[in-house]
Image (spheres, helix red, strand yellow):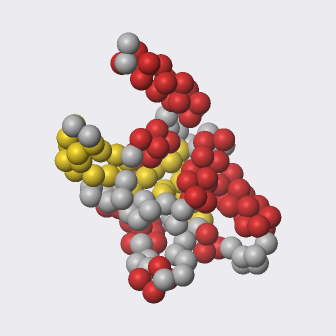
Amino acid sequence: MKNKNLKIALIWSVPKWKEIENFIDWKTEIKNKIFEINEKIEILTPDDFKGDFSDKKQIFWFSSNMLQKSDVIICQTEKKLWLWTAHEMLMWKVFWKKIISIVSKNSDYRKKNLQIWDQIVEDRIHSFLWSISDEIIEKIWDLDLEILNPEKNNSEFSEIVVDSIDYYLDKIK
């Protein structure tokens, strides 16, 4: 990894309405783990937004700026992703940055022994998260310096999409 201060963006679905009452703030735990790895890492989050939530352009600018100036994104996927969080992940690939997804077993996007029609899938990770993530970890504590290395990311997302289409077409022949 280059000798520079790493910038990590944390994204998650910001709680709305009734979710606010039951929101478990995972950011403290992940910040502690990141600072344990390297205390010089800079963490950027949606909490840094100081603008007007009714101004869509401000929100879009803030998120785009946060993503562009970060080296790595960590996405908490314990609960369902809102459209905006998924959109941020796609935008991230526009900037060719690394995405780490936290996907616990038996969460909304990872199921153990899931029956789909007549098949049982032992460990199913949602195909969207699999395709867009450079790393998938089960718990915050699985993070280490190697996983955080921004230089170790997958090829361009468009290549993954094209390869996946070709793979599928070959399988159904």
Compared with 151, 72 (above or below) is below
Compared across the picture, whether 104 is left or right of 12 comes to: left
Quarter of image, res 44: bottom right
- Residue 171's spot in the image, x, y percent? 36, 18
- Residue 114's spot in the image, x, y percent? 24, 48
Depth check: 13 or 137 in front? 13
Compared across the picture, whether 171 is left or right of 152 comes to: left
Compared across the picture, whether 141 is left or right of 32 comes to: left
Give me the residue at 54% from left, 81% from top: 17
| Residue 143 visible in the snapshot | no
| Residue 45 visible in the snapshot | yes
Q: Residue extending furthest front?
A: 117
Compared with 50, 165 (above or below) is above
- Residue 142's spot in the image, x, y percent? 31, 55
Depth check: 46 or 173 in front? 173
Compared with 58, 97 (above or below) is above
Figure quadrant of the C terminus: top left
Depth check: 97 or 129 in front? 129
Q: Residue extending furthest top?
A: 173
Give me the residue at 23% from left, 45% from top: 115
Compared with 82, 153 (above or below) is above
- Residue 117's spot in the image, x, y percent? 26, 40
Number of on-image labels:
0
Give me the residue at 27% from left, 52% from top: 111
Give me the residue at 60% from left, 42% from top: 93
